[in-house]
């Protein structure tokens, strides 16, 4: 369970290396980045005996297939998907022991969007500004994986957790996003704030690691002047000129010039990471 | 001064003017440097705001901030960086017309004043620099370019910016520099940080800037 390499047999639609992200550089324009579904990332690491901060692979809808050069322990969490060990079914959400040379395949997500594949020892690409995460907005960290890529693995340190099946709720059939209004809710009409709470929104297919975009009603502004650029947080619900709310995710820019009507707390964002295009979205504002 | 809640773990200090934002930012950095500020993961200045992000006890910090008196003295200045520029951008004529000067005079106006990084964003290493007077404000291009070359020196609104790497962009391009704005092999990677003072030095025709 130590060192070795991971060979990417099938990279899938978009598979990136992710950990818990980069901190302390937002004032220089560096996004937090990191796994979008942080509980799933942590769980995958725990199942293989890694620290939470070890890097995993984050897939997008179509999964990934990798070959381990040495024997390894792996676990798949996040979006449920068929897991195959050298073509035979293997458990999802549990530690799986792979002999040297074996291929573990994460199939297409049956629900949700992003699965996490943790390998004992963690993906050990060089850290950039304290993180191994791929930041798609600014191009920091390793590029999205391609077939044939080889990734170094760290030395396994911890012991795998022996859980038969990890307790992890599957992605919901509706995305419910709690939201604290502000800091710029007063830039919108009272009707717009009511629309935010009562409107029927859906996840746009233009969503990505930078932001979850919505289709549906537009939020009308009460203040029409330009907002001077100000600092942004992950979870900010920004409203661009087209009026459709956009939820900032891990790779979002650190400053922005459109008003933020409210902020989704960290605990609401894992569900956003698993919300596929077309899923209904309900915002639940609270003061 | 208003302190606005931003979710559960961030506060936005909302100020009336860019100068006040500059003073507050400097004061926050000073207090953090002295260990007089509680845990705050990120201090992110904006044009008229300072965002405090990653604050475990936002209510306590909000109460504390309201008791501060911040004076303008704090923001004297950061390090001075000189940036050589070839004033050869494709939007030089447009900018010159807006400024009411001849295209060959844009270099003199732009390099004749000290600029200062007000805040960063858009991309790692991208700095929003102020220093041109109000009369030199220009709008963004109506049609953003799909690709602006790295090292392009550009203006928009009251700001000058330099594209750290090739990206889409809507600012008016007035010149180019070969200075690396963002270099991960360097510590710090960003050449320009909030508070940095910047002087643009016109490079002679044909010289590598």
Image (tube, helix red, strand yellow):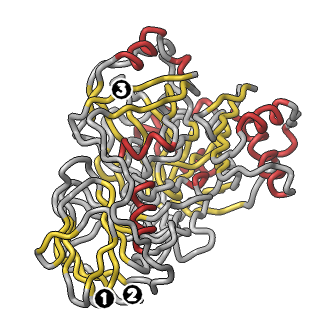
2 or 1: tag closer to the N-terminus: 2
Q: State the CA–CA distance, disc 1 to disc 3.
A: 45 Å
Q: Position of residue A66 (x, y in %)?
A: 23, 76
Residue A1 image label:
2
Rate crowding at label 2 as few (under 14), some (14 to 19) or many (20 or more) other CA atoms within 10 Å: many
Which residue is rendered at x = 54% and y = 50% of the image? Answer: B107
Which residue is rendered at x = 83% and y = 36% of the image? Answer: B64
Rate crowding at label 1 as few (under 14), some (14 to 19) or many (20 or more) other CA atoms within 10 Å: some
Judged from the image, the secondary structure of the residue bearing numbered disc 1 is loop
- Residue to which mark 1 is pinned: A71
Q: Position of residue B152 (x, y in %)?
A: 44, 56
Judged from the image, the secondary structure of the residue bearing numbered disc 2 is loop
- Residue to which mark 3 is pinned: A282
Q: State the CA–CA distance, disc 2 to disc 1.
A: 6 Å
Which residue is rendered at x = 48% and y = 67% of the image? Answer: B178
Which residue is rendered at x = 30% and y = 88% of the image? Answer: A71
> Which chain does tag 2 point to?
A
Is residue A252 visible in the rendered structure shown here?
A: yes
Do the residues under discs 2 and 1 have CB atoms within 8 angstroms?
Answer: yes
Residue A279 image label:
none
Q: Position of residue B140 (x, y in %)?
A: 42, 35
Which one is closest to the eye, mark 2 or mark 3? 2
State whether residue B56 is above or below residue A165. Answer: above
């Amino acid at each position: 369970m130590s060192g070795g390499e991971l060979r990417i047999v099938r990279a899938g639609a978009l598979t990136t290396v992710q950990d818990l992200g980069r901190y302390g550089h937002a004032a220089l324009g560096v996004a937090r980045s990191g796994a979008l579904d942080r509980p799933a990332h942590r769980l995958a690491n725990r199942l293989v005996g890694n620290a939470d901060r070890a890097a995993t692979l984050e897939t997008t809808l179509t999964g990934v297939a990798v070959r381990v050069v040495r024997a390894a322990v792996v676990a798949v969490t996040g979006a449920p998907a068929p897991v195959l060990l050298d073509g035979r079914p293997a458990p999802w959400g549990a530690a799986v022991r792979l002999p040297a040379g074996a291929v573990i395949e994460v199939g297409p997500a049956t629900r949700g969007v992003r699965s996490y594949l943790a390998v004992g020892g963690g993906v050990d690409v060089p850290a950039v500004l304290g993180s191994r995460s791929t930041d798609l907005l600014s191009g920091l960290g390793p590029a999205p994986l391609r077939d044939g890529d080889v990734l170094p693995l760290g030395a396994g340190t911890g012991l795998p957790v022996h859980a038969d099946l990890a307790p992890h709720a599957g992605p919901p059939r509706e995305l419910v996003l709690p939201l604290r209004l502000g800091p710029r809710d007063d830039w919108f009409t009272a009707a717009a704030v009511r629309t935010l709470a009562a409107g029927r929104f859906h996840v746009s297919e233009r969503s990505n690691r930078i932001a979850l975009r919505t289709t549906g009603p537009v939020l009308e502004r009460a203040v029409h002047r330009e907002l001077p650029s100000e600092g942004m947080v992950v979870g900010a619900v920004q409203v661009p000129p087209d009026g459709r709310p956009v939820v900032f995710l891990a790779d979002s820019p650190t400053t922005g010039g459109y008003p933020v009507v409210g902020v989704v707390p960290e605990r609401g964002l894992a569900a956003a990471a698993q919300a596929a295009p077309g899923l209904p979205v309900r915002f639940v504002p609270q003061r | 001064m208003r302190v606005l809640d931003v979710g559960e773990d961030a506060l936005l200090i909302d100020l009336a003017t860019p100068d006040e934002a500059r003073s507050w930012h400097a004061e926050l950095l000073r207090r953090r440097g002295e260990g007089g500020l509680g845990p705050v993961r990120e201090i992110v200045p904006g044009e008229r705001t300072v965002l405090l992000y990653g604050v475990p006890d936002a209510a306590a910090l909000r109460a504390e901030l309201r008791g501060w008196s911040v004076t303008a003295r704090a923001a004297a200045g950061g390090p001075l960086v000189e940036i050589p520029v070839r004033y050869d951008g494709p939007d030089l004529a447009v900018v010159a017309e807006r400024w009411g000067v001849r295209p060959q005079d844009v270099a003199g106006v732009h390099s004749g004043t000290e600029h200062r990084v007000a805040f960063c964003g858009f991309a790692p290493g991208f700095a929003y620099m102020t220093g041109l007077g109000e009369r030199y404000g220009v709008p963004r291009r109506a049609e953003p370019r799909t690709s602006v070359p790295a090292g392009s020196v550009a203006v928009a609104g009251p700001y000058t910016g330099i594209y750290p790497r090739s990206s889409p962009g809507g600012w008016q391009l007035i010149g180019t520099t070969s200075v690396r704005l963002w270099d991960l092999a360097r510590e710090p990677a960003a050449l320009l940080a909030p508070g940095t003072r910047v002087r643009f030095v016109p490079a002679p025709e044909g010289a590598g800037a």
